[in-house]
Amino acid sequence: MNKNDNAFRPLAKKMAALSLPILAGQAFGLLYNLVDTWFIARIDTSDPWLVGATGLVFPLYFIVMAASFGITGGVSSLVARAIGAGRLSELDSTAESGMFLSVAGSVLFLLPLYGFARPLLSLFGGSGAILEYGHSYLVWLLPVVPFMFVNAVFVGILQGEGKTQPMMLSMMLGTVTNIVLDPVLIFWARMGIGGAGLATAIGNLVSTLYLVSVFIAQRSSVRVHWKLSRISLPVAGEILRVGVPHSFMNFLASISFIFYNRMMVGLNPMILTAFTLYSRLEQIALIPVWSLSSALSSVAGQAAGARDLDRMKASSRTAALMGLAVSGTLYVIYALASGTLFSAFQSDPRILELAAVIVPWMALASVVSIPIFMFMTVMTTSGFANQSLILTALRIYVLSVPACALGVYVVGKNLQSAMMALFAASLIALGVSLLWESRFFRALETGRLTVRVSAGADTVSASAD
């Protein structure tokens, strides 16, 4: 116990130093989301479907994000483990191999999304005005896809190295561009909600250009040779080995919105708009969790590569405690101020009443999930994304979705009962995660699990030595 206590302070200090630049960049991202939502709402504040249309599009956008996060996670894990193991030569083809995957991913997503935009939005619960708004928004948003994938490679490299300042600046530059262009494209260019989508795409392009400049200036230990001949199939395979399960974790979360949206729309279609308001503004409390997760990816990944099991355990606990302290406090503030915040974006009293029901229960569920999120980050960055995928599937499809259905169709049959059921599912998921974490580290200690430190076939047993 004393050993863990002694480890807490330096680890907390290191993760704070790594996460603060990301926190600053994501704070700008939060500002963008607030401003973007505000400008969209200003098109017609009495129209309940405008803001809801962005929530309709979000599951599809999140699917693309999930794929890009998979590349980021795969690249970051490979870089962190190789650095921890002192095998820097493994990194020479990382950028080109990641770029190859990015181009393939962009083509894979753009073709069906442009070709089947309207049917896909209908599948996610869209109809009538909200479908028309959502289609307009999505069509102009889709040019963002290739920039998201390219950014994923560069961000993954920087995250694995623990170089968070360039990550911060890329987020800030893209966000500022987006905020400036929102009113120009929405109102001056008369593009309406489609202008918000195009502003997002251009903002991501600016982030891409900055990140390219970082690597041209060789501010990373990972070299970009800008040659097709540097593409390595073993390196691409290692990125996919971690990245594909990581992507599927996010896919599962996105696909679950089909079930949640249809259940909630069955109760009241306006719940979709209310939940979109909640989820957009919830980022006030979530950005410290995302920032800590980014720092944890670097610390735990390098510890895994160095076979330092004690540091892996301590980093998971430290990140969870820091996340609970900071985000828990922010969730309390958010819940208390939510009425005032929501009224700035929506004047329909029916939407505000529904949002008031959502806030307390979803905030509690999110706080309870913070330790789960940190543990899954440790498993993923140490090369065990497949286990994180299984835990995610269990948490969403065995616990949360059935619990929500129980509240909608059986017990209570209203929004309140659905929210209470989701919170109960989160508590059960926390218990499962804590048990899983204990068994995971025991398996590493006994050698039943091994940490791969190479893009090839080599593996080493993790130990506490």
Image: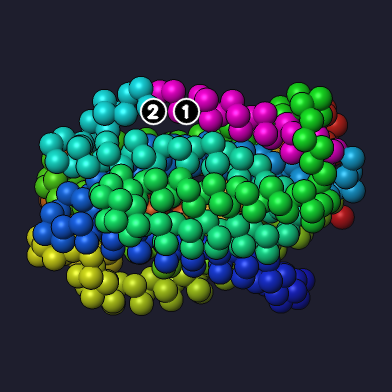
**Label 1: how many Cα within 10 Å (few below 14, some 14–19, many 20+):** some
Residue depicted at x 28% and y 66%: 360
Quick one: SS at disc 2? Answer: helix
* Residue 5 or residue 316, whichever sits in front: 316
Instruction: Give the residue number, with chain letter if any, for mark 2.
Output: 113
Residue depicted at x 20% and y 57%: 43
Tell me residue 387's x, y (percent): 59, 38
Q: Are marks 1 and 2 in contact (CB under 8 Å)?
A: yes
Tell me residue 122's x, y (percent): 23, 30
Q: Is residue 71 left or right of residue 283?
A: right
- Residue 227 figure quarter: top right
- Residue 45 figure quarter: bottom left
Predominant SS of the magenta segment = helix
* Magenta residue span: 90-113
Give the tally of numbered discs: 2
Give, as a three-letter code, the residue at label 1: Phe
- Residue 417 figure quarter: bottom left
Tell me residue 247's x, y (percent): 53, 36
Instruction: Give the residue number, with chain letter if any, for mark 1.
Output: 109
